Image (cartoon, rainbow, N blue to C red):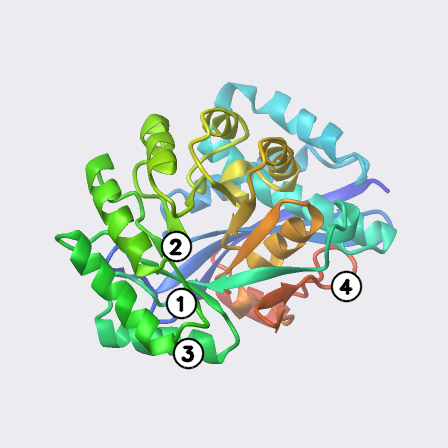
Amino acid sequence: MKITRVTVEVLETPLNSQYMAGGSSVNSNWHILARIYTQDGIEGIGFDVALRPMLVRAAAQACQELGDLLVGMEIMEIEAARARLERAAGWAGPGGMLCMAMAPLDIAMWDAAGKTVNQPLYRMLGGYRDRVRAYASEALWYSLTHDELAKSAQTHASAGFDMLKLRLGHEANPQGEVDRVRAVQEAVGPEVQVMVDATESWTESQALASGRALQDAGIVWLEDPVNHQDIAALARLSQALEVPIAAGEHLFGVEPFVRTLEARAVNIAIIDLARVGGITPWMKVAALAQAKGVPLAGHVIPEVHVHLLAAVPNGHLVEYMPRSEPITKTRLKLEDGHLVAPKTPGLGVELDEAACERYRVT
């Protein structure tokens, strides 16, 4: 079935006041929402999520201009459609803006393709399993006090999560980081595993010292200990520490993952769906990681990542950050600490059209 129309809009959605980024209060999310329509009446949706408005409108404009080039193409020929867009925007990429502009279109095409053949996305992409272990990570920021961290962690544990991730990197010494982890551990008990994200805030020597202290404290995951561009440092930390090093959410496109995986710089590869450029390149990174024996995690957008991680053998963990709930009617189901992939066609996401209208800014 051929594509007949593509629309793109920007939505500003509310964010819980507890959610803090980099120590600064953030009041809203920004979505780039793409809709692709086919001649048989199917609508596919895809979206990016950002915490700040910087360049969101520019990316949305690029998304619309690229989307117009899809009209007349077959909805099931996603690689051909992507190749057309990459040729058209060749002067502008590869790069971050191009990836962010292409991602909603790519996701929307896969959603429409799944609806066309009446299959959920995780089955179309491989169907290795129908659920993925999940961890909660909202409202566990470094700006919170120990008591606030403990309360938030208890809320997540009560909801059924047996893995939590808190942000570190703002303490003066490793013991300060350990104390924050201890506050969470004491709040939730030994049945809940604790992960940490250093948000690229340490030097290599700081990461080594803090990593050793934190692994002794019992963490099960150390994310982004140093800047993602310092592949050599990541590789040395992966060799020196026993706790798994997770990184990759800051990488745009496929090529940076090739270099990172070749250097064996990570024990777990994290893919950001928007930064990698959508589902099509996501699956290519997944195959590269599988060839290296590296498990995968997804960065935010759990509504899509639950499908992708369920589809591939090396799907490991899905991050539960429900930042699109204000514009959706459907909710992901959590069972025994796992998010269950929807069985309805495509993404299985139903938009709340009244909310989309209310939050639309362009």
Q: Is mark 4 on a helix, strand or loop?
A: loop
Q: Residue at x 48, y 33 (%)?
A: 252
Image coordinates of residue 216 in percent, x first then y, are: 30, 55
Q: Which badge, 2 or 1, is on the more N-terminal residue?
A: 1
Q: What residue type is labelled 1?
A: Leu
Q: Name the image quarter holding residue 273.
A: top right
Tell me the residue that label 4 is attached to: 343
Marks 4/1: CA–CA distance:
28 Å
Marks 3/4: CA–CA distance:
28 Å
Q: Which residue is drawn at 78% across and 43% down?
A: 4
* Residue depth check, mark 2 versus mark 4: number of the one nearer the observer: 4
Q: Which badge, 3 or 2, is on the more N-terminal residue?
A: 2
Q: In the drawing, does residue 77 fall left or right of residue 250?
A: right
Marks 3/1: CA–CA distance:
17 Å
Q: Residue at x 58, y 61 (%)?
A: 133
Tell me the residue that label 3 is attached to: 155
Crowd tier of the residue under label 2, counting other residues whose Cα lies within 10 Å: few below 14, some 14–19, many 20 or above: some
Image coordinates of residue 99 in percent, x first then y, are: 52, 35
Q: Is mark 1 on a helix, strand or loop?
A: loop
